[in-house]
Amino acid sequence: MATNLASKHQTTLDTAVRALHERTFFAHYPENPSPEVYGENADKEGREKYTSRLDNKFDELLQENPENWAGQEESPYEQQPLGIKYPFFAPETLISRAEEAYHQWRKVKPADRAAILVESLERMKARFFEIAYATMHTTGQAYMMSFQASGPHAADRALEAIASGYEEQTRFPESTEWEKPMGKYNLKLNKSWKAVPKGVALVIGCSTFPTWNTVPGMYASLVTGNPVIVKPHPKAVLPIAIVVAELQKVLAENGLNPNICQLAVDADDRLITKELAENPKVKLIDYTGGTEFGNYIESLKGKTVFTEKAGVNSIILDSVDDLDKVAQNLAFSVSLYSGQMCTAPQNFFIPEGGIKVGGETVPYEEVVQKIADAVTGLVNNPKAGPHILGAIQNPATTERVKGAATIGGNAVLTTCDFSNPMFANARTCSPVIYEVEASNKESYSRELFGPIMLIIKTKDTDQSIELASDMAREHGAISCGAYTTDPVVKEKIMDEMSLAGTPVSFNLTGGIFVNQNASFSDFHVTGGNPAGNASFTNPEFVIKRFTWVGFREPVVG
Amino acid sequence: MATNLASKHQTTLDTAVRALHERTFFAHYPENPSPEVYGENADKEGREKYTSRLDNKFDELLQENPENWAGQEESPYEQQPLGIKYPFFAPETLISRAEEAYHQWRKVKPADRAAILVESLERMKARFFEIAYATMHTTGQAYMMSFQASGPHAADRALEAIASGYEEQTRFPESTEWEKPMGKYNLKLNKSWKAVPKGVALVIGCSTFPTWNTVPGMYASLVTGNPVIVKPHPKAVLPIAIVVAELQKVLAENGLNPNICQLAVDADDRLITKELAENPKVKLIDYTGGTEFGNYIESLKGKTVFTEKAGVNSIILDSVDDLDKVAQNLAFSVSLYSGQMCTAPQNFFIPEGGIKVGGETVPYEEVVQKIADAVTGLVNNPKAGPHILGAIQNPATTERVKGAATIGGNAVLTTCDFSNPMFANARTCSPVIYEVEASNKESYSRELFGPIMLIIKTKDTDQSIELASDMAREHGAISCGAYTTDPVVKEKIMDEMSLAGTPVSFNLTGGIFVNQNASFSDFHVTGGNPAGNASFTNPEFVIKRFTWVGFREPVVG
């Protein structure tokens, strides 16, 4: 069966590998949740399927003999528990099952592994709408983002990891004849090489992007032959549970052990992440989440670790063509999912002398006001606000926004009150804005997760660049937006931010935002600053998951 | 000028990249030190040049204003100081010069960097003989190995690193236009990417292979745009000093700062390796040497580290066609450079019931005797012994061999006395052999650097495999030799040793030995066990030296 899958998906795989290197637009999974693409009833059926799960056991996994059933999700839109229970397994059970599955999975050829994994994404595609509702009611993302980020965009990031892993494992010959002229005779050796997977892999998910941030590491470890234990955040299990269940079914259909990929949930009274991570049999760990736990993961000995932690993202404003368009673009970026994105901008550097707009200087105060007005306008637009802001995943985020006044800056926009007309009980919060002095470095030197904008008044653009680059170098950054019409300034920003390992989006206006990044084109996180040590999906993201081992023997005869 | 070099060396580079992927025999630098290849007087001139350096200052480097002059090399053949003095610079001077050079070198395009580096290898080629004599009289290697390992083989390993780094940096487009259909319009972005070098690199050399083990990391860091500080072992400076001097000249000729690659020697009263390694500005470290210092290097925070430490290499004897040929091959492997190679075998696993030879069982005792006889025969052969054994680099090695009796095994061959007819004062030592029980694991669980063979009597081949694999997993291994005519046993050895990250050479007899490995074909060290975390030259060896950073901007108009 794997062989049939290999021919079924070879074109997809080849196209994906080519796309990795062309880095032009490529998407295998359409991002538009339209009936024309996904079927007339797909949305309705997905919603019904999601609803039918509430207060029930999630019984789709092929992992046998659970010790218990556990679940602690609750909807940010309803502020009510979902009541879904998942099978619980002790870490030692998960690891011994993974070890057993390892010795089967590692012997499957990379091309066959890739085909099986692509097939699982096709099955996931059939459940994008159900995953979307599951994502909404665990993360608080609005409907469109829930669909796109957890569905097609996640599947494309997974396909990217599969393609990259497949390519890297087939970049050297399986075998060759080596013939060295020695003068009087030739020395001949048969040589062969194996890409040997490192062993049990653990993937630790986050609460805000339960599939998008989980599938790259999960599929990267799987395609390179490692069995995977997926450990979701206890508040966001369902979206990835569906993905794991679909993969397990494909594995079983192909005569393989479904424990090649297991779901691991915490029990209500037993958090298992550290126990799993510290187990010496766990060789690979992917982690997305806060810096403190990420640093702990990075400090574990004898593991290969891939992290995405927190960053302090900057916007540098120097000169623009159309300030209104820029303000609207930035207002969208800080409002999108109420700033709960690792790519959301936080620190806005604006020179005290103002910025050039179409050649004329617009004073600092006016620039700040324009941005504040754009945020207010967007939040108060009933056709936009609720669909962009979504809900707040964690009550701690609302508290952080409400406590932002203690930063000590000048308040520009303080109320985060916002009501979602569709969900009366939703936990919501719109962006607040504070102005701080460049000299008050402490106030803007850490990630303030959520919809908090800090406007930092600088001496000039040179200081803006210096501070943005310092922040990235010292505290990490995943994105940077810069606005300049001056090619010399642009070159300087590129140079300084590149040394700080931070990608830069220049002069974005209209329908593209600094928070967004595209599979097969934008590397997500560079690995080059404290925001994370890994990147979706550069070659390093896959090749560190296996070891090249060679064998040789004289040619007989 | 760099442009001329780029066209001059493009074919070499393209051929080398192709060779990396074909992994058939390829060598750009001929290993035969014959007058037909290198010129009638090359050897004589090289020797004279070497001799003229003794008791003089090494004044070829372009590093200005030395603080002092220092040198502590001595010849293992003469047991006399060489008296060569090298310029000494304080670590802070070296690092600030490297930082300055960084900002020039990182802006040179990868293709131009590669061309400049290949040119430096061509200059090195013109000095292979001088480097050979320098290597003999620092490491104790015999003449042929000194020439090959420090000359052509090292240059080919360097070329391999250059080719790999060049390939990896050009694997993604410099820029592209990204166009996403949005329904009513297309979203267009200009995108570009930079491979951003990580910063100051330190390469720490060892005393036994001063160029071969240094140039891969050195050239890998350089081709990816990082300035390099080469810190040789204080007892083996001259061979690599010549290489660095040649590279500095090529850099200067091309209008570049020669401090892009600096030589850093210890002062007699100030060891500077730790100071350099711990400096936060040092981002990359390559290290070859003992395990203890290697573990310290690996434990440093905020660095990307590439290590080759010690391993415990095994030979597994199961069944052979011709025992005499096997014994001769193994005797050569343990005698070559008196076992002072990281690839030399140490632990010989032989089943107590003996091994099959052409279908007949030969008892254990007879196998041991054959090997001992082969070693004695080789050592006592005046045409072979001195040219294979060379001299002992470090007096501690001789002490270790003399103290091997304390291991507690049964002595098979205890005298290591050996006189070199060409060098009456040479520090020499031929292999000793001890038999130990498989149960006495402690005795064979660490590297006994030098010509020490341990024969371990096992229950059967399964136990031999298990122990060899355990040793590799727990204590590291760089090579493994296995002799079996049984395909099932062979498959098992491949599988078990691959999981222990150890390459296996099967059934070697004649002119190829387990210690040898070939550039462009054999990966040296896998990175998959405690013997080291890096591999010459897999993609990981180069891509961890830079960060991919992307830039994007809407297409105007």
Image: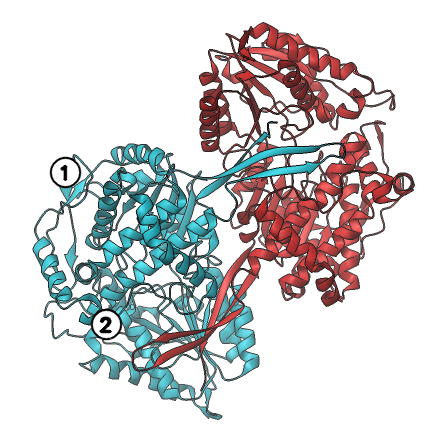
Chain colours: A red, B cyan
The percent position of residue B362, horizontal first and vertical second, equals 43, 91
Question: Which one is earlier in the sequence, the residue at label 2 or at label 1?
Answer: 1
Picture quadrant of residue A405: top right
**Disc 2 packing (10 Å; few <14; some 14–19; many ≥20):** many
Picture quadrant of residue B525: bottom left
Residue at the spot 54% in from the left edge and 38% down from the top edge: A526
Chain under numbered label 2: B
Viewport quadrant of the C terminus of chain B: top right
Q: Which residue is mark 1?
A: B68
Q: Which mark is residue B424?
A: none
Could you tell me how many numbered marks the image carries? 2
Residue B41 seen by the camera: yes
The front one of B186 and B114 is: B186
- In screen coordinates, is B547 left or right of A235? left
Disc 1 element: strand
- In screen coordinates, is B504 left or right of A376? left
Q: Are marks 2 and 1 on the same chain?
A: yes
Q: Amino acid at mark 1?
A: Asn
Residue at the spot 65% in from the left edge and 20% down from the top edge: A330
Q: Which mark is residue B389?
A: 2
Disc 2 element: helix
The front one of B343 and A468 is: A468
Up-down relation of residue A397 to residue A434 (above or below): below
Residue A199 seen by the camera: no
User: How far apart are the alpha carbons under marks 2 and 1?
Assistant: 37 Å
Residue at the spot 54% in from the left edge and 41% down from the top edge: A298
Q: Amino acid at mark 2?
A: Leu
Up-down relation of residue A255 to residue A444 (above or below): below
The percent position of residue B495, horizontal first and vertical second, equals 56, 70
The percent position of residue A163, horizontal first and vertical second, equals 63, 53
Viewport quadrant of the N terminus of chain B: top left
